[in-house]
Amino acid sequence: MSGADGAGTADAPGAGRVVLVVNSGSSSLKYQLVDVSAGGPLASGLVERIGAGDGRATHTDAAGGAFREEVSVADHHAAFAWMLQAFAEHGPSLEEHAPVAVGHRVVQGGARFFEPTVITELVRINIDELSVLAPLHNPANLAGIVAAERAFPSVPHVAVFDTAFHQTMPPEAYLYALDRDLAERHRIRRYGFHGTSHRYVSRAAAAFLGRPVEELKLIVLHLGNGASACAVDGGRSVETSMGMTPLEGLAMGTRSGDLDPAVVLHLQRRAGLGVDEVDDLLNKRSGMLGLGGHGDMRDLTEAATSGDERARVALEVYAHRIRSYVGAYAAQLGRVDAIVFTAGVGENSADVRVTALSGLEGFGVEVDAARNAERSGEARRISTDASRTAVLVVPTNEELEIARQTVEVVAG
């Protein structure tokens, strides 16, 4: 605990610029100690299967040295105790690299939180109340906050909300065409997610292009197991594909994405599925897994290449949905300076990128096959020099973005 108590001391290396970033799940704790000045992690770790009795934990330092252990972690408090012990035994020292604050990823901020916020009792109450909109995420995020505040009582804790970046959307983008009073009473509207990633990537893309983000109109495609598109105008989100929940929008690894609402009614009336069964179907057994038999894009692509027709069709559906959103957002923006791919699939699958952009030549999109095939951990251009619309691959870094926003709040 001594490292936590000494956080923010004036003579500590990088004082005021080191942040502990916490992403707390219902049965996991993911953490990263970030040096904001250097723009990278000093250490990271993951505690899994909290409360299950047969957990696993990993702690990795900046040099890539990893310590792994089978653990029995009863709750998030015990997970933080393991983390502190890992820092003490395997480094880096929290005395020498004392965090000035702890930044927490919180999934759902509703319409109440539009910027990173120092956590107070009132903020905790609000996060808890918003659990009705994110029952799988906000309670877990809150459990991590409570445990982290006990482990690091001497520094401020900051909530960075996935939904905050999208609070700049205009009403015509976030409202559903439902009975207005009913929708407002039950807080039904588009909130959007992956906001931390979209914010980071849009600014990183602007830096790569050497232009102020305020001048650019971008379409950012965050393609991972979860996937979302975002139209960014002058650094502000004006449209995004995920809705009230992360289920809406693009086809994903296991989520259906856009669906006629009457399908749910049909499944209940004709197939006899209950509410929880439909929820499980649409979130965990649909998407690429349901269509093509594989939730992992690497496995799906391999199967399609080997002649699996279901897998091939699933990939076409995936790409078709992306193209549809790119076209719609191009119409909303008026022009597109760059289309930006990010996250696990977006950064690593050349096949997905070229298939998703196929047929968009009329929008000024020309992909350079050789550039697209290159693998790199750096931001890069994959469009031809003649392409009117730049196409970029920009690795996302949500932990660094959370750390940056946390430092800004604490310093401000």
Image: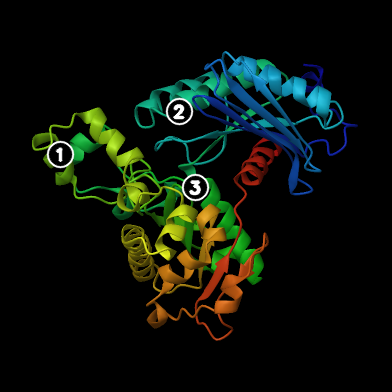
Q: Which residue is mark 3?
A: 195
Q: Can I make out residue 152 in this image?
A: no
* 149 relative to 255, above or below: above
Total marks shown come to 3
Q: Give the CA separation, mark 3 to mark 1.
A: 32 Å
Q: Is residue 162 left or right of residue 249?
A: right
* 322 relative to 358, above or below: above
Q: Which residue is mark 1?
A: 267
Kindly give the residue lying farthest to the top in the view shown. 74
- Residue type, mark 2 in image: Asn
Q: Give the CA separation, mark 1 to mark 2.
A: 28 Å
User: Quarter holding the N terminus?
Assistant: top right
The picture places residue 301, in percent across and down from the top left corner, at 45, 60
For marks 1 and 2 on the same chain, the one whose residue lies earlier in the sequence: 2
For marks 3 and 1 on the same chain, the one whose residue lies earlier in the sequence: 3
Please name the residue shown 34% across and 49% down the image. 287
Secondary element under disc 3, as helix, strand or loop, is helix
Disc 1 residue crowd, few under 14, some 14–19, many 20+, Cα 10 Å? some
Q: Can I make out residue 131 in this image?
A: yes
- Residue type, mark 1 in image: Leu
Q: Give the CA separation, mark 3 to mark 2.
A: 16 Å
- Residue type, mark 3 in image: Gly
- Of 93 and 45, the residue lying toward us: 45
Q: Is residue 56 left or right of residue 183?
A: right
- Within the image, what quadrant is residue 92 found in? top right
Disc 2 residue crowd, few under 14, some 14–19, many 20+, Cα 10 Å? many
- Asked whether the beta carbons under mark 3 and mark 1 sit within 8 Å of each other, the answer is no
Q: Which residue is mark 2?
A: 138
Q: How is the image coloured?
A: rainbow
Please name the residue shown 82% across and 30% down the image. 91
The picture places residue 191, in percent across and down from the top left corner, at 38, 43
